Amino acid sequence: MFSLSKRSDVEPFHAMDVLAEATRRRQAGHAVISMAVGQPSHPTPQAALVAARTALDHGRIGYTDALGTLALKQALAGHYRTRHGLEIDPARIAITTGSSAGFNLAFLTLFDPGDSVAIARPGYPAYRNILAALGLDVVEVPVTAETHFTLTPESLEAAQVASGKRLKGVLLASPANPTGTVTGRAALKTLADYCADRSIAFISDEIYHGLTFVGEETSALELTDEAIVINSFSKYYCMTGWRIGWMVLPERLVRPVERVAQSLYISAPELSQIAATAALEAGVELDTYRESYRRNRDFLTQRLPEIGFSIASPMDGAFYAYVDVTRFTNDSMAFARKMLADINVAATPGLDFDPIEGHRAMRLSYAGSNAEIEEAVERMAAWLK
C-alpha cells in the first residue's frame, strides 16, 4: 500500500466541513441558516453577469496570458487610481484563480522549505495549512487587545525569540478574518518599515477591502512598492464561485510568479476575468450590498451580548463576529455541531482560527441577508435559554 505525503497531514478547514454538513441538512429538508462561511448572500453584480452572458454568446472561452487579460489588469490599475490615488503599472498585476492561488504563488516564489513565516493567531486557517503543506515553518503570533488585535514589531520580535527562528515573511490581513480588525495606516506603515529594514517579505491580504466600517482602509501599496498585495473578487464583489483574484507585485517578482503560474494554473478562467472586469464598474450596486452588511453588524453588536455571546474583538471590517462562548461551553467544536443539529444554525468553531484558544470561541458570518441573520440570532436566543 502506498503512503501519503507528510504535507497532506494538515488540519481540515472546519468552516468548509460545517458548510458541507449544513448543505446535507438543507438537502434533507431542514431550514438551515449558515453563518459558517464568508460567502455573500447577494448575487454577482448585474454588469458582470451581462458581460459573461455576452462572452458566452459571442465567442470561444479559452486560455489567456498566464498573468491575465490586459483589459482586467488595466481596469484594476484604474481601480487603484480612483480608490487609492496610486499609479500602478498593469504589468505588476497578476490575475489569479481566486486569492488562494495568489497565496500559493506568493509562498512558492518567496520561500523555500523550512523558511519561517509569521501569521496572526487567531487568523485565517488556510494560511497555516497552505504554508504547512509547502513545508514552511508557521509562526503563529498571538493578537490580543494589547496589540490592538494586529501584528506589531514587538509581537514579531517576541515570536522570533520564542521560536528561535528568523522570519523570512510576514502575512497580515486588514480587515482581518476572523477578528474583523482593521489595521490603521500608521500601524501598517510601522509594520511595512519593520519588514523592509530586516529584508522580510511583507504580504498584505486585502481581500476584505471595501468592507471597512470603522477606521482607515489603507492599501499597503500606498506605503511601499515592496509589499506583495493579494486581493479577490469574492467578498466585496460577491463573486466567490467565479474563483477570480489578483496580486500586485514588486516589479522583480512579476516574472518569477509568471513562471510558476504558467505551470500550476495556465491562466485564471477567461470567463471569470471578463465578468470581473465589468464588476469593477458596479460600485453603486455593491455599496448597497455593503450597507446590508453594516445593518447586520449593528444588529449583532447589540444582540449577541444580550444572548450571552461576548464579542471577542471589534467588528471593524469584513463580515464576521468573533465571539467568546465560554458562558456556555469550553468545546466550541461540539457546541457548533449541536447548534446545527438542534436549531439548524451553522457557525464555525474557533479552532479553525486559533488551535490554542479557539475552543473558547466561534466565528459568525454576517454576510447573509438581514432577515436570515435576525432569524438565526432569535433561534440561538431561544436555544441558549
Image (spheres, rainbow, N blue to C red):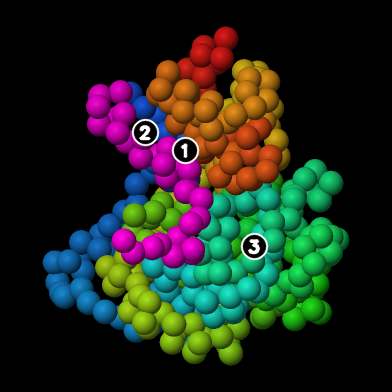
In the rendered image, the quadrant that contains the C terminus is top right
Q: What stretch is highlighted in magenta?
A: 1-30
In this rendering, the label closer to the viewer, 2 or 3: 3
The residue carrying mark 1 is 36
Which quadrant does the N terminus fall into?
bottom left
Between 134 and 230, the one lying in front of the other is 134
Q: What element carries label 2?
A: helix
Tell me the crowding category of disc 1: few under 14, some 14 to 19, or many 20 or more residues within 10 angstroms, Cα based. many
Image check: 54 left or right of 92? left
Give the residue displayed 46% in from the left and 78% down from the top: 94
Task: Please state which amino acid type lies under the numbered disc 1.
Answer: Ala
The residue lying at 63 percent from left, 35 percent from top is 359
Of the two numbered discs 2 and 3 on the same chain, state the one appearing first in sequence: 2
| In the depicted structure, whether residue 146 falls above or below residue 259 | above
Q: Quadrant of residue 2?
A: bottom left
User: Disc 2 versus disc 3: distance between alpha carbons?
Assistant: 31 Å
Which residue is found at the position 14% from the left and 72% from the top? 58
User: Which percent across, then down, holds residue 346?
Assistant: 45, 31
Is disc 3 placed on a helix, strand or loop? strand
**Precedes in sequence: disc 1 or disc 3:** 1
Q: Is 79 located above or below residue 111 in the figure?
A: above
The kind of residue tagged 3 is Val
Q: Nearer the viewer, residue 69 or 376?
A: 376
Measured Cα–Cα span from mark 1 to mark 3: 25 Å
Residue under label 2: 22
Residue position for label 3: 138
Q: Are marks 2 and 1 in contact (CB under 8 Å)?
A: yes
Vertical relation: 319 (above or below) 58: above
